[in-house]
Amino acid sequence: MSTFLKKDPESVLGVFPSDHFISNLEKFEAAIKKGYELAKKGHIVCFGITPTRPETNYGYIKRGEKIGEDVFFAERFVEKPDSKKAMYLVKSGYLWNSGIYVFKVSSFLKELKRYMPHYYEVFMRIFSAVAGDNYIDELRKAYRFLEKILLTRQLWKRQESLLCVFLSLNGTMLELGALLKGF
């Protein structure tokens, strides 16, 4: 992110989990392109998938107001519920949170500064040290000041204009990390 911040803070950045297998690349690409266009306008975009079953290893997104074809506000996030709650969420129309996000670097940093100023300051110290000789030392110092957090809990849930693009994959996405849990 620091490279994008220095070269072009209006760059659009995508965050993609490394353990996803997606077989319908055409639908995936169309959704990502839609998210990219929304992100260029300053929105932070997440991607929701229709659940095929209750799943305790996934987070969920509650759809808010629809604002376009397969686009709506993300009203609420629920992280990895127990099986009873997962069943309720599926029946209530919640989507799986794919963990995929697209946003302009400047939009992300603006929201981070607004809702999590301590993290913003630490990130900015790291970014400014990237090209220098003290980068590793600055990174080590920064980790001592940061807690392990989920952005969906700390940042995205506060962001009033977070958009969700419906990712119509019809069960063709697998989170390999969840499938291999326990091996």
Image (cartoon, rainbow, N blue to C red):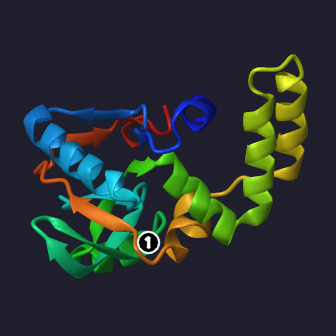
Question: Which residue is depicted at the point 77% across and 34% down?
Answer: 128
Question: Which residue is depicted at the point 34% across and 53% down?
Answer: 39
Q: Position of residue 64 (x, y in %)?
A: 28, 81
Observer able to see residue 28 = yes
Q: From the viewer's perspective, is 102 left or right of 28? A: right
Question: Which residue is depicted at the point 48% across and 66% down?
Answer: 79
How many marks are shown on the rendered structure? 1
Q: From the viewer's perspective, is 77 left or right of 23? A: right
Looking at the rendered structure, the kind of residue marked 1 is Phe
Q: Is residue 65 positioned above or below 74 on the image?
A: below
Question: Which residue is depicted at the point 18% across and 58% down?
Answer: 52
User: Which image quarter is the N terminus in?
Assistant: top right
Q: Position of residue 108 (x, y in %)?
A: 54, 55
> Which type of secondary structure does the marked residue at label 1 adopt?
strand
Q: From the viewer's perspective, is 28 left or right of 63? A: left
Q: Is residue 32 positioned above or below 153 on the image?
A: above
Per the image, the residue denoted by label 1 is 77
Label 1 neighbourhood size at 10 Å, few (<14), some (14-19), many (20+)?
A: some
Q: From the viewer's perspective, is 90 left or right of 153? A: left
Q: Quadrant of residue 11?
A: top left
Q: Position of residue 153 (x, y in %)?
A: 57, 68
Q: Quadrant of residue 175?
A: top left
Q: Position of residue 37 (x, y in %)?
A: 25, 51
Q: Is residue 7 positioned above or below 109 on the image?
A: above
Front-most of 67 and 170?
67
